[in-house]
Amino acid sequence: MVEPTWSDRYRQHVLDLIGRSRIHVRDQELDQLLLVDFGLGDFEREGVAITDIVHTPALRLKILVLLPGQTLPEHIHPPYDDSPGKEETLRVISGSVRVYLPGPDTMREGAIPEGKEEFYTLRNEHLLEPIRQLTIPPDTWHWFQAGTQGAVCYAFYPQAVESHNRFRDPRVPKHIAPGY
Ligand code: ZN
């Protein structure tokens, strides 16, 4: 018998969160659900699940799912060519997400993954709950962390070039940036 992979093990949990969010998703979109551990080997701690709703050169809309307490590592969408970099809008459908941006330390609820302080430099906390949304400007470092119920969100991007994303943790491979 083939041993289930970490992705198989967490997939049902992610599907349950999507189901409980009451968002309407096509079967094909669920089939294409991608669980990403950023090459860091601990999906439950640092990872995200995504599926695309729209993905054209001009627009990307995806569903982003975080398990309870799961962290999407600190990263930036820098400028390239004639573009200022990728803008990102996050809108919470269910659960809650704390978004960390540059600014004064207002961290209250979140927690830096243990032993990873050097890769999480931002402490300016923005709590997003259902129907709240936040737009992260291009070329701005950010990271996310779900609350105790996990989170299901929409993420909107006005452009779908993903190859320029950079992560603070150098262990994240450069090719592993399909859009965050
Ligand atoms: Zn991002």
Image (cartoon, rainbow, N blue to C red):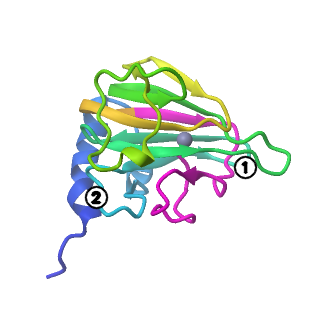
Ligand 1 resides in the quarter of the picture at: top right
Quarter of the figure with residue 128: top left
Residue type of the residue flagged with mark 2: Asp
Element at badge 2?
Answer: loop
Q: Are marks 1 and 2 in contact (CB under 8 Å)?
A: no
Element at badge 1?
Answer: loop
Characterize the local packing of mark 1: few (<14), some (14-19) or many (20 or more) Cα atoms within 10 angstroms: few
- The percent coordinates of residue 75 (x first, y second) are 53, 45
Quarter of the figure with residue 42: bottom left
Identify the residue under disc 1.
57
Residue 44 vs 89, above or below: the answer is below
In screen coordinates, is 171 left or right of 175? left
List the single residue furthest toward the front: 118
Task: Tell me the quarter of the image containing the N terminus.
Answer: bottom left
In screen coordinates, is 34 left or right of 69? right
Q: Is residue 167 magenta?
A: yes
Residue type of the residue flagged with mark 1: Pro
In screen coordinates, is 49 left or right of 54? left
- The percent coordinates of residue 92 (x first, y second) are 42, 26
Q: Nearer the viewer, residue 109 or 28?
A: 109
Identify the residue under disc 2.
42
